[in-house]
Amino acid sequence: MRITTFKCVRPCTSSNPTPHHQHHHQIGGATSTTYKPAKCKKALAPTTVKAQAPAMNRKMIKNSMKFGENWTDYQGGKNWEGLLDPLDENLRSEIIRYGHFVEAAYRSCDFDQSSPSYATCRYTKRKLLKETGFSDTGYRVTKYLTATSGIQLPGWAERGPPWMAVQSSWIGYVAVCQDREEISRLGRRDVVIALRGTATGLEWLENLRATLTPLSGSDSGSGSDTEPMVESGFLSLYTSSVGNRRSLQSMVREEIGRVLDKYGDEPLSFTFTGHSLGAALATLAAYDIKRSFVNSPLVTVISFAGPRAGNWRFRCGLEEQGTKVLRIVNSDDVITKVPGFQQESRARPGGSYTAAAAASFAGWVQKLVEDTQWVYADVGCELRLSSRDSPDLNGISIATCHELKTYLHLVNGFVGSNCPFKATARKMMCTK
């Protein structure tokens, strides 16, 4: 029997690393500022979800989740210790709930390449959650988000089909919990930033720009392990602006600042969630927000099928600032194994992890690692699942293993390493 396990990445710093001071920082050339909360007066491959995802409406959740006092545990405050194996029922419901916000982003985007509204949102903010089948969330969409590619196409390409030439596309939204009953159940006011996966031609091209680049936006980095570096294409989609098309970074910062001004004196959480490309951008955005707003509340990333996003120093930066990342990974999904080479650990705190990784390869691979900025590190905690454990998935294909609906199905059925899937558990009990 195939055993499904989870892995929690060991922090590279001491516990409770959230800093209490803030300096000016640069991400992609943009300067961030210190935030002091005002006293409140108050994918890579796109997924079209056809099959019904695990139903988890608010009424069902209320019957099984009474965790308002311990909400930080489910947001990763203790790195999900004791909640992943076996998978805690409350955490299972929360993962699926956040997955539905990502599914709503997919259902809202116009993927019809012949449509004049291609790569835009099909619904107004007021109707988005209702029209996509998630009207009972207790959240209200407050901001639409677009991503702009920094790739400059030749003139002839701009006259091509929309999927090739569109430079800015709708990629997700921000939603704020407004329902008093839901706020009480959650133990705080939650803010969701949901991002879809790859859709347009330029987004695909950005995915292929797999070399690491410094977050500062400079070209001085040459694979140094003293500087946070991320995948070039992801950084481009996050920070690029063209003409009057604002960057995704500026839109996220603006909305987070507005929410903090309005609700800063309440218990508050920011949950970034995405699938595939959206998962990578969610991780990058969470890192940026935690650095931009020094007194920001708990920031959590729920990542579905995310590719690797950055180097070892980026991973350590996330841990040092207190950003919590839960990566849901399908062992049979190739996208979670790219880009680049994976760096598990460093030989010593001050040593070069690039050299340590290269030492384990044959000569020609070693030279490749040394000459290219392709050494990545997984971040956060990992919930590892497998399509092969589900009796409901017929056949294993690259596309199916990467789909969001597959991930939600696996989360819904996962039990623990001793019994990977609920259907298996029922069968085992019946045979005794």
Image (cartoon, rainbow, N blue to C red):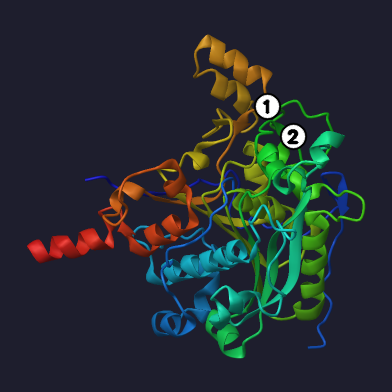
Seen in the picture, residue 258 relative to 396 is either above or below; the reply is: below
Is 7 positioned to the left or the right of 268 in the image?
left
Seen in the picture, residue 123 relative to 348 is either above or below; the reply is: below
Residue 226 visible in the displayed image: no
Q: Amino acid at mark 1?
A: Gln
Residue shown at 55% from the left, 36% from the top: 338
Seen in the picture, residue 178 relative to 236 is either above or below; the reply is: below
Q: Circle 2 — which element?
A: strand
Crowd tier of the residue under label 2, counting other residues whose Cα lies within 10 Å: few below 14, some 14–19, many 20 or above: many
Crowd tier of the residue under label 1, counting other residues whose Cα lies within 10 Å: few below 14, some 14–19, many 20 or above: many
Image location of residue 177, percent across then percent down: 64, 79
Q: Residue furthest left?
A: 432
Picture quadrant where residue 374 is located: top right
Residue shown at 64% from the left, 18% from the top: 370
Seen in the picture, residue 125 relative to 377 is either above or below; the reply is: below
Q: Amino acid at mark 2?
A: Thr
Image location of residue 421, percent across then percent down: 28, 58
- Residue 373 shows which numbered tag? 1
Q: Quadrant of the N terminus?
A: top left
Q: Nearer the viewer, residue 409 or 345?
A: 409
Precedes in sequence: disc 1 or disc 2: 2
Q: Residue furthest front?
A: 114
Give the residue at mark 2: 213
Q: Circle 1 — which element?
A: loop
Is 324 positioned to the left or the right of 247 in the image?
left
Q: Is mark 1 in CB contact (under 8 Å) with mark 2?
A: yes
Question: How many marks are shown on the rendered structure?
Answer: 2
Image location of residue 331, percent across then percent down: 40, 43
Q: Quadrant of the C terminus?
A: bottom left
Q: Nearer the viewer, residue 299 or 48?
A: 48
